[in-house]
Image: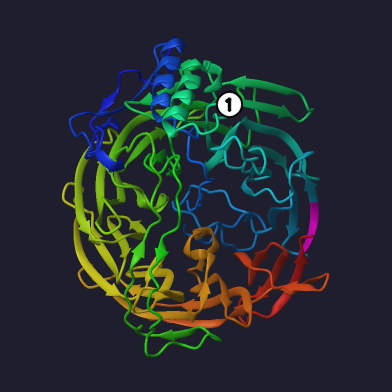
Amino acid sequence: MKPLIRKALTVAALATATAACTSAPSGTPAKLDLSKNVRLVSYSSCDDMLAGLREHAADNVGPWGFGGPIMPYMAREDTAAVPQAKTADAPDHSTTNVHEAGVDEPDLVKTDGNRVITVTDGTLRVIDTATKKVTATLKLTEKGQPVYQPANLLVSGDRALVLFEGGNIMYKTFAPVGDTRYVLVDLSGEPKVLGTIKPKGGQFIDARMVGSTVRLVTRSQPDITFPTPKDNATDDERTKQNQDVVRRAPLDAWLPKVEITDASGAVRKDAVKCERVSHPADYTGTSLLTVHTIDLAQGITAAGTDPISLAADGDTVYGTPNSLYVASNPRWWGRIVEPMAVDDSSTSAPAAEPTPTEPSVTATAPEATATLTATPEPSTPKAPPEETEVHRFDITQPGAPSYVASGKVPGRLLNQYSLSEFDGNLRIATTQSQDQKNSSSAVYVLKSDSMAKIGEVGGLGEGERIYSVRFIGPVGYCVTFKQMDPLYTLDLRDPAAPKVTGELKITGYSAYLHPAGDGRLIGIGQEASDKGRPLGTQVSLFDVSDPAGPKRLSQMFQKESGSGAEWDPHAFLYWPKTGLAVIPLSTYSEQQQQDGAVALKIDDSGISKLGMITHPVHKQDGYSYQPGIQRSMVIGDSVWTVSYDGVQVNDINNLATQAWIPLH
């Protein structure tokens, strides 16, 4: 058997080690074993693969199978929308707000300046930006599939890849929302389907596109049907019964499968070969990650998607022009994850708060504190260490990515912005918590070629957790929150000795950080009361020109409101050419709720409000609502905003409505 991945490559780990752990009482995380290395190796044979998967999966199966009795809350996180270089006759326009320049990310709308492309209710629509009319549609909903299935897009030239996300795969007893499938569409004339790829039983995790080449990451669970437990059976009895089933399961239950349909309708099925499956030193055996590769310019070739798989868990994807990283938070896998709850035992509020009718701009904000609690996690067969495992792949060559190295760090990631590759190193920010009160965050630096740890700085936000991270070149910014919002500035110029250079304590928190030119940083999040109760959306402009003394120059605060940009960076638009920023905004009170997007002017000295953009009220069968705006774009001299109901075009200077384009 010829291994695809170097079989004996071993790397020094970050902080580090293997996921192998000693048992700990009462479900507390086991201590990281720092004496071992992290590695990713191929199996020696199909028999070796089956034995390993059975053994590890049996150790991790519980009375309810691979997971708990309740469907988990799966939060999606999970940048810079810079002017796009003009193509022939294309107006200046913004692009998807992505993490790394040159690496596109899937989003619900794409534009090349001449066209706006989006998918709603299973139908792809192409809008001509000159006439502001829908010029082409293509129904992509398959028989038996729900029209509301989520879909995102990646576009390269006249090729679009539509990504339909499948439902939750963790529990066989719950019907999925729909199958995961990737549909390649030709946009050169009347849109037509060139091919469809279905990872059978797989769930879409994320994708990245460099040039015209897309790498898609899916996760699959073993196709094992667990028996109905006997009445009054104990958890131990159920677990043993499930372990017996796992130990008899065939290899085919684990091997990821794919079904490819070409333009003629011909279908071919395939499964990932044993020699293309690798594994880290320790793994749960409860899921496999598969990386599919598609060059949109070439379409679906005889090689299919050239898949490779890892016997590993993963929920975070980060990409650069040269690397693809897949990271896992094993402690969360198969558990119930609930959003952090705010202790609002006190109803006291700041002495003075802005009125809820209009966003206000101030230079300072009232003091606030917060107490956060987390929903307890249920017991599981094992309590693995609280750690993050990261695998790096080289994507500089055509075809399947090649494995480079793996590393492991204590704590867990917030999202992909917790990862950043710069100057041959990978920076990772994590939070580690022994319980709800004792937590701390740190930034680790690893050599990207070996994933060996070379430096770290810890002690960030004692008793708090990370709410946002942003690395910009050799500088890092980290926001933690519990009672106050410390914004830490980090000097990462010496990767062996990273250090905190400054700290700014302010009220509320920033959930997303965005660069705004030399010495300026934009933060989007929530203001908070003196007991930590969120009060409404706030946008802050920070002066970070002095690393030792970061300052907040200005703040917009909208009482009783929330913004999708707090958890989805794709919803944030920043147009450096004019300083325009647009974010979705929902304001609510006992009387009413208003949805729209607030347009701001952010310059070197502060934030000013330009106005609100709202979409027409939807009225049907005596019921009415105002559509929530999901995305914003700049095309030429107009701001284009997208909601479920339609696309609106507003003048970039005075926000006057120029056109309304319904999507139904």
Q: Is residue 536 magenta?
A: no
Relative to 369, residue 303 above or below: above
Residue at the image point whose x is 69% and y is 21% from the top: 268
- Compare residues 575 and 205 and report the one nearer the observer: 205
Q: Nearer the viewer, residue 13 or 522?
A: 13
Vertical arrangement, residue 310 with respect to residue 498, above or below: above
Using the rendered image of the protein, determine whether residue 512 is visible from the camera's viewpoint: no
Left or right of 564 on screen, residue 43: left
Q: What percent of the width, then of the height, locates residue 145? A: 74, 42
Q: Position of residue 616 (x, y in %)?
A: 73, 74
At 44% from the left edge and 51% from the top edge, which residue is drawn? 100
Q: Is residue 154 visible?
A: yes
Q: Main secondary structure of the magenta part?
A: strand
Q: Secondary structure at mark 1?
A: loop
**Residue most extreme to the right:** 621
Residue at image location 24% in from the left, 32% down from the top: 22
In percent of width and height, residue 459 lies at 20, 57
Q: Which residues are magenta?
A: 132-136
The residue tagged 1 is 225
Q: Position of residue 477 (x, y in %)?
A: 31, 61
Q: Is residue 41 depicted above or below 567 in this figure?
A: above
